[in-house]
Amino acid sequence: MSDEDDLEDFEPDQDDLEREDDEKETEEWEDDRKEEEDFSEEWMPTPLTEDMMKEGLSLLCKTGSGLAHAYVKLEVKERDLTDIYLLRSYIHLRYVDVSENHLTDLSPLNYLIHLLWLKADGNRLRSAQLNELPYLQIASFAYNQITDTEGISHPRLGSLNLKGNHIRMVTGLDPQKLISLHTLELRGNKLESTMGINLPKLKNLFLGIKDTGPKT
């Protein structure tokens, strides 16, 4: 016990370290985003293709009655994608990573009713809204341009990451629908209050409230 007490006297505050790392990471993403906006006019439409699907698909599993098989995992990160319309046909996907592209629309994911895990970090999304996905458990929309928390109503969602967006107020997080949400990440936004966060199973809440007081 005494050794641990001595160490505590010399260790830096963990919250301060995490806060510094978080601020640095957010600043780096903001710099990258500004660079992308400067060159946005040069982007060409880049839809998801069958060849990309073949390269990104993995994890062969049984589907339905167990008599058929399909690949259920897809990773197509850093492909400069602007369109994932093709995903509408891949209804058996359970794990999808479309991070670090130029996506503004995730609506094709509404057809993936077996989706368990979604990562869509580092795109150009202004909303995380999707139809209710009955099995979705983990969703990450970090470092986009999302301005609100509307349209998130997945009953089995346990972890939601909205870090590094432009959210000022939390609205639309219905405690009657988000009955499984235990972890909510909101650091790196422009939050002005914690109003709207009233979730029955929430255990881990990460946020940074914007300081609106006078600066000295």
Image (cartoon, helix red, strand yellow):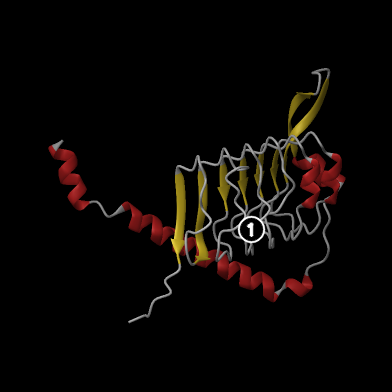
Q: Position of residue 194 (x, y in %)?
A: 47, 59
Identify which residue, 4 or 215, lies in the foreground: 215
Q: Is residue 155 left or right of residue 193?
A: right
Question: Which SS class for mark 1?
Answer: loop
Per the image, the residue denoted by label 1 is: 122
The residue at the point 72 percent across, 40 percent down is: 133
Relative height, residue 56 to residue 145 (above, below): above
Relative height, residue 97 to residue 26 (above, below): above
Q: Position of residue 140 (x, y in %)?
A: 61, 49
The residue at the point 64 percent across, 64 percent down is: 145
The residue at the point 85 percent across, 47 percent down is: 86
Q: Is residue 175 left or right of residue 151?
A: left
Relative height, residue 96 to residue 15 (above, below): above
Q: Is residue 150 left or right of residue 28?
A: right
Quarter assignment of residue 35 = bottom right
Q: Residues within 10 Å of mark 1 (few under 14, many from 20)?
A: many
Q: Position of residue 127 (x, y in %)?
A: 68, 59
Q: Residue furthest front?
A: 176
Q: How many marks are shown on the rendered structure?
A: 1
If the image is split into quadrants, where does the C terminus sit?
A: bottom left
If the image is split into quadrants, where does the N terminus sit?
A: top left
Quarter assignment of residue 30 = bottom right
The amino acid pointed to by label 1 is Gly
